[in-house]
Image: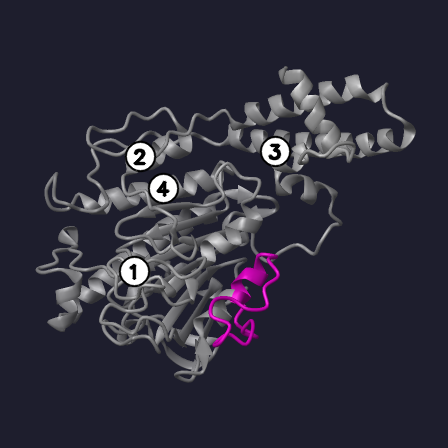
C-alpha cells in the first residue's frame, strides 16, 4: 500500500496524475535552488540580530567624529573596538508605530505596527527582519533560524505569529544538538534528535528506488521528465553530503549545566544570569559553526524590558528605573555589557575559518533597541549598530537627520545584502525602498 501510494504521488509530480507533487513538498526550496541559474553571490551569508529594550542612549552611542570615516568610539564600544573597521554606526531612524511609554516593541524588528499595540505583550504586526531573511537563506538548514534570550520575543513570522525565544541554555542545547538532559522544571524546547541528514537520505533513496521501477514503464516524454527529477535528486544528495560533512567536522560543545534561566528569576542567587547569557551566545555560535542555521536572534531584555535587573553588574534597581533615576553610570555599564556579549560572539566568528576567510567575513551582526535612543519617546532616534564583513569593509558613522529615514529602509538594505531581493520592508506607507549607501 505504501509503495503504491508513493508511486502514485511520484507520477503526479511528473505531471502524470492529479495529485499534488511529491518532491516540492518534501524538499521545498532546495530543488528550486538546485535547478536555478547561478546568481550573484550575496554580500553576507550569516545574520545575527541582538535586541534590547529601555533605550540605547545617544550620549553613549554617539561617536566623536571628524567625518564619516574618521571617528572615535565611546567607552561602551570597548568590547568590540578591535573591529572598528568592520562597524557601521547609524543614528536617528524613526519607527512611527506604538508610541507608548515602552518604545516601538515588535515594530522595532518588523517595522509594522502591532494589531493590538496596547496589549502586553503586544503581538507582532508582520514578519521580523531575521525571520524574513531566514525564509530565503535558511530554507535548507536544520533550523531556518534560532532565537534565544529573555523576555517577550521580537522575532515573528507574520501578524500575530510570534516566533518564540528559548530562555534556558539547557533547553537550547537540547534542541540544537541533542543529548542534553533538561533540568527539572525547564520546559523541553523540542529536543533535536540529530538525524535529519539520515532522514533526508532515506527520502531520496525511496524516491530513487521508485523511479527505477517506473523508468521501464514510461514513454520517452515522461522519461525525460523523470531524468530531470533524478538530476534534482543528485543535486540534493550533494547538498546533504556537504552539509553532513560540515556538521560532522564541528566540535560538539559541552552541555551547559547549573545555569539559571535567562529570565533571571533569582533561583540560584544574584549574578547567575550573566553566565546564562554567555552560554546562550556560545550555543548560538556553535549552531552556526555546525551549519545548523544561518540566522539567529539573541534577546537581552525582550519586547519592553520592564524592570529587568542586572544583578551581576551591581544594578541597584532595575534597568527601567535606572533610566528614570538618571543613573547613567549603571546604564553605561549595562550597555557596555551588551557589547561584551556581541564581542563574545564576534571573537568566535573571527577565529573560525570559513571558505577563504573567516565566519565573521561572511556575517552581519546588528544591535537594535525597542526604546530607540531614549528610554521613553525614542521612536524617532533609533540607532542601528552593524558589525561584520571583511576587515576594512566598513568603519563608518552615519548621522542621519532626525525623522528622515524609516527603519524599514535599513532592513530592506540588509535583506538585499543577503541576496533577498526586497524593494520595501515593513509599512509601505513609510518605506520608499532600500537606503542607498547604508551597506
Dot in front, 4 or 1: 1
Q: Residues within 10 Å of mark 1 (few under 14, many from 20)?
A: many
Residue at image position (30%, 40%) is 279
Give me the C-alpha separation between circle 2 and circle 4. Answer: 14 Å
What residue is disc 1 on? 122
Instruction: Answer whether labels 1 and 2 touch (C-beta < 8 Å).
Output: no
Whichever of callouts 3 and 2 sits on the residue coming sooner in the sequence is: 3
Q: Secondary structure at mark 2?
A: helix
Dot in front, 2 or 4: 2
Whichever of callouts 3 and 4 sits on the residue coming sooner in the sequence is: 3
Q: Quadrant of residue 139?
A: top right
Q: Residues within 10 Å of mark 4 (few under 14, many from 20)?
A: some
Q: Nearer the viewer, residue 222 or 303?
A: 222
Q: Is residue 372 visible?
A: yes
Which stretch is magenta? Answer: 412-439
Give percent across and percent down for residue 84. 43, 64
Give me the C-alpha separation between circle 1 and circle 2. Answer: 25 Å
Instruction: Answer whether labels 3 and 4 touch (C-beta < 8 Å).
Output: no
Give percent across and percent down for residue 112. 42, 67
Residue at image position (76%, 49%) is 37
Magenta stretch contains residue 417: yes
Whichever of callouts 1 and 2 sits on the residue coming sooner in the sequence is: 1
What residue is disc 4 on? 282
Residue at image position (27%, 39%) is 168
Whichever of callouts 4 and 1 sits on the residue coming sooner in the sequence is: 1
Residue at image position (39%, 27%) is 178
Amino acid at each position: 500500500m505504501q509503495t503504491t501510494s508513493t508511486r502514485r504521488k511520484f507520477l503526479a509530480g511528473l505531471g502524470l496524475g492529479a495529485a499534488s507533487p511529491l518532491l516540492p513538498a518534501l524538499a521545498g526550496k532546495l530543488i528550486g535552488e538546485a535547478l536555478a541559474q547561478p546568481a550573484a553571490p550575496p554580500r553576507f551569508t550569516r545574520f545575527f540580530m541582538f535586541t534590547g529594550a529601555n533605550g540605547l542612549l545617544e550620549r553613549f552611542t554617539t561617536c566623536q567624529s571628524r567625518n564619516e570615516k574618521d571617528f572615535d568610539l565611546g567607552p561602551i564600544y570597548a568590547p568590540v573596538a578591535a573591529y572598528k573597521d568592520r562597524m557601521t554606526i547609524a543614528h536617528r531612524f524613526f519607527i512611527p508605530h506604538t508610541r507608548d511609554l515602552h518604545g516601538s516593541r515588535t515594530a522595532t524588528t518588523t517595522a509594522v505596527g502591532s494589531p493590538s499595540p496596547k496589549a502586553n505583550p503586544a503581538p507582532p504586526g508582520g514578519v521580523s527582519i531575521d525571520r524574513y531573511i531566514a525564509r530565503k537563506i535558511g530554507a535548507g538548514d536544520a533550523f531556518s533560524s534560532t532565537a534565544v534570550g529573555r523576555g517577550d520575543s521580537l522575532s515573528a513570522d507574520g501578524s500575530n505569529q510570534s516566533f518564540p525565544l528559548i530562555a534556558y541554555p539547557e533547553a537550547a542545547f537540547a534542541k540544537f544538538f541533542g543529548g542534553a538532559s533538561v533540568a527539572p522544571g525547564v520546559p523541553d524546547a523540542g529536543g533535536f534528535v540529530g538525524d535529519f541528514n539520515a532522514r533526508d537520505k532515506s527520502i531520496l533513496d525511496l524516491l530513487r528506488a521508485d523511479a527505477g521501477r517506473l523508468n521501464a514503464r514510461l514513454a520517452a516524454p515522461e522519461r525525460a521528465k523523470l531524468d530531470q527529477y533524478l538530476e534534482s535528486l543528485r543535486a540534493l544528495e550533494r547538498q546533504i553530503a556537504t552539509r553532513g560533512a560540515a556538521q560532522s567536522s564541528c566540535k560538539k560543545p559541552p552541555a551547559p549545566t547549573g545555569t539559571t534561566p535567562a529570565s533571571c528569576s533569582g533561583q540560584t542567587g544574584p549574578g547567575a544570569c550573566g553566565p546564562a547569557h554567555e552560554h546562550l551566545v556560545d550555543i548560538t555560535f556553535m549552531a552556526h559553526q555546525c551549519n545548523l542555521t544561518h540566522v539567529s536572534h539573541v534577546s537581552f531584555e525582550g519586547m519592553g524590558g520592564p524592570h529587568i535587573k542586572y544583578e551581576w553588574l551591581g544594578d541597584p534597581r532595575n534597568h527601567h528605573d535606572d533610566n528614570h533615576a538618571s543613573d547613567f553610570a549603571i546604564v553605561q555599564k549595562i550597555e557596555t555589557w551588551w557589547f561584551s556579549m556581541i564581542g563574545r560572539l564576534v571573537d568566535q566568528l573571527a577565529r573560525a575559518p570559513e571558505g577563504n576567510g573567516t565566519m565573521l567575513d561572511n556575517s552581519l551582526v546588528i544591535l537594535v533597541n525597542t526604546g530607540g535612543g531614549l528610554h521613553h519617546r525614542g521612536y524617532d532616534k533609533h540607532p542601528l549598530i552593524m558589525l561584520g564583513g571583511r576587515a576594512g569593509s566598513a568603519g563608518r558613522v552615519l548621522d542621519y537627520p532626525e525623522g528622515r529615514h524609516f527603519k524599514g529602509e535599513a532592513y530592506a538594505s540588509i535583506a538585499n545584502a543577503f541576496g533577498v531581493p526586497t524593494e520595501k520592508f515593513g509599512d509601505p506607507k513609510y518605506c520608499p525602498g532600500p537606503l542607498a549607501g547604508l551597506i
